[in-house]
Amino acid sequence: MSFFASRWVDAPDCAVEVGDGLLPQGFRAAGVAAGLKPNGALDVGLIVCDAEAVTSAARFSRSGAQSAPVLITRQQSQLDGLRAVVVNSGNANAATGERGLLDAAAMRAAAGAIAGVPPELVAVASTGVIGVPLPIDAVTAGIAAAAVRLRNGGGAEFGEAIRTTDAFRKEVGLDVQLSGGTVRLCVQAKGAGMISPNFATLLVFAQTDAEIEPDEVELLLAVCTKRSFDRISVDGQLSTSDTIILQASGASGVRIEPESDDERAFGEVLDAALRQIALLVAKDGEGARRIGRVVVRGGDQRGVERVAHAVADSPLVKTALYGADPNWGRVIQAVGAALPGSAPLDVDIEIEGIEVCSQGSYVEHDAQALAEAVRRDEVEYEVTLAGEGAETERFFSDLGHEYITINADYTT
C-alpha cells in the first residue's frame, strides 16, 4: 500500500516512495534495547549527521509542564546546525526536577561525544511514563551500544526505538526530483495517545540531504507543522514531550534556493509527508477504528478554529464515530458549545456530503446512505457558519473501549 493512503493527502508528483531503508546522504542512525521497555524492545535511538554544514529547525510542546529534554534542548542547544538527535522511549523524563535536567544533559553529552560535536549541537527527546526518574545509567549504556550500530540504513531501527503505545511504525522515505537533481527526505515519528490540536503529542524527526538555508528550514518546518501536527486530535490532551526536528545535511550537493520552484516543490513534498504522518498518528489513536476530518467555513478565523477544535475534541463526536453512529446532534452540540451566546445558531452541517442540518435545523435526508457513509475508515464532517472568509480543518480519531484499557493499565 502506498504511504499516501488517505484521500485527504495528495501524493506529490515530483516524489517517489523508496523502500531501500536508506537515510539521506550524510545521516546515520541506530536503535538498541537498553532495558527501559520490557521483552527486549528497542528503546534508545540515535541519529548523527556527519555533514558540518547541516541546517536544522525544531518545534516543541507548548505545555507548561515541559519535560527535561524539551527544556534542555530549547534552552541550551543551538537549534540551527543540530548534528545529532538522541531519544529514549519508555520514560518521558518529565516532572523529574533537577535530576531530570541532569539526566537529559547526560544524554546530550553522551551523544555529542559519539558524534564528535559539542553538546549544544545535540537534541534530546524522551517519551513514556511521566513523573518517574530516568534510569540514566541504562540509557547512557544504550547510547554507547547505539554508537557501534550507526549506519545509513539504520532509520527503521531508530523508528522502532522511539515507539511507546504505537500499534505500528510511522515512517517514510521519498526521493524528490528537483531541477538540480534528486534529494531524499525521510521521516520517523511516534504518537498514538495524548494528542491534541495546537500541537500534538508526538516525536517527529525528518532528514534531507538537500542544501537549504537556515531561514528556509525554519520557514518550511513552521508552515508544514501548522498544516499537520497542529491539526490532529486523539484525546485532546497536550503532552509534556512533543518534539519535531528537521535537519538538512546538504550532502547531495543539490541546493534549494529561497523562493524558487525547487523550494515550492520540496515544500509540497514535506507538507504532504508530514500531513500523512499526522493522519497516521490520529489513525493509530490507541484502539481507534476510524478517523474523522472536520472542515469549518464561514464566520471569522477565531470562530472557525474554536468550532473545529470543539468538534475534534468532543468525546461525544468521537464515540459516535467509533460506533459508526450517524448522530449529527453530537456535532451541532459541539459547535454550540464553542460559540456560546450565539443562539439561535445559524449553521449548516454535512456528513460525507450528505446535508443533515441547514440554518441550525434538521434537513430531510437519506438515513440509510448516511448510516453506510459513517462506517467508512475515513469520515468527513463539514460545518458552515454564517459569514464568509474563514476556513480551517482538524483530523481526529474516534474514541472507544481500547483507549480506556490502554490508558488504565499504562503504568502497570
Image (cartoon, helix red, strand yellow):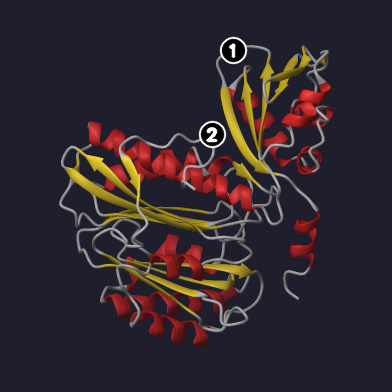
Q: Which mark is residue 388?
A: 1
Residue 365 image offset from top left, x and y in percent: 80, 16
Q: Is residue 198 above or below residue 405?
A: above
Kindly report which numbered mark, 1 or 2, lies closer to the viewer in this rendering: 2
Quadrant of residue 380 within the rendered picture? top right
Q: Quadrant of residue 334?
A: top right
Question: Would you say 304 lies left or right of 273 here?
Answer: right
Residue at image position (17%, 44%) is 181
- Can residue 159 be seen here? The reply is yes
Of 259 and 18, nearer the camera is 18
Residue drawn at the location 18% of the way across and 37% of the way down: 179
Q: Which residue is mark 2?
A: 8
CA gap between label 1 and label 2 equals: 23 Å
Q: Could you tell me how many numbered marks the image carries?
A: 2
Q: Residue at x 72, y 34 (%)?
A: 311
The first of marks 1 and 2 along the sequence is 2
The one of 284 and 215 positioned closer to us in this rendering: 284
| Above or below: residue 407 compared with residue 56 | below
Q: Residues within 10 Å of mark 1 (few under 14, many from 20)?
A: few
* Quarter assignment of residue 266: top left
**For the residue carrying disc 2, how many other residues have a C-alpha within 10 Å: few (<14), some (14-19), or many (20+)?**
some
Q: Is residue 137 left or right of residue 223?
A: right
> Residue 388: percent from the left, percent from the top?
59, 12
Q: Amino acid at mark 1?
A: Glu
Horizontal and vertical percent position of residue 349: 73, 20
**Which SS class for mark 2?**
loop
Q: Is residue 388 left or right of residue 228?
A: right
* Residue 370 picture location, percent across and down: 77, 26
At mark 1, the secondary structure is loop
> Could you tell me which residue is drawn at 31 percent across and 72 percent down?
151
Q: Nearer the viewer, residue 208 or 284?
A: 284
Placement of the C terminus among the 4 image quadrants: bottom right
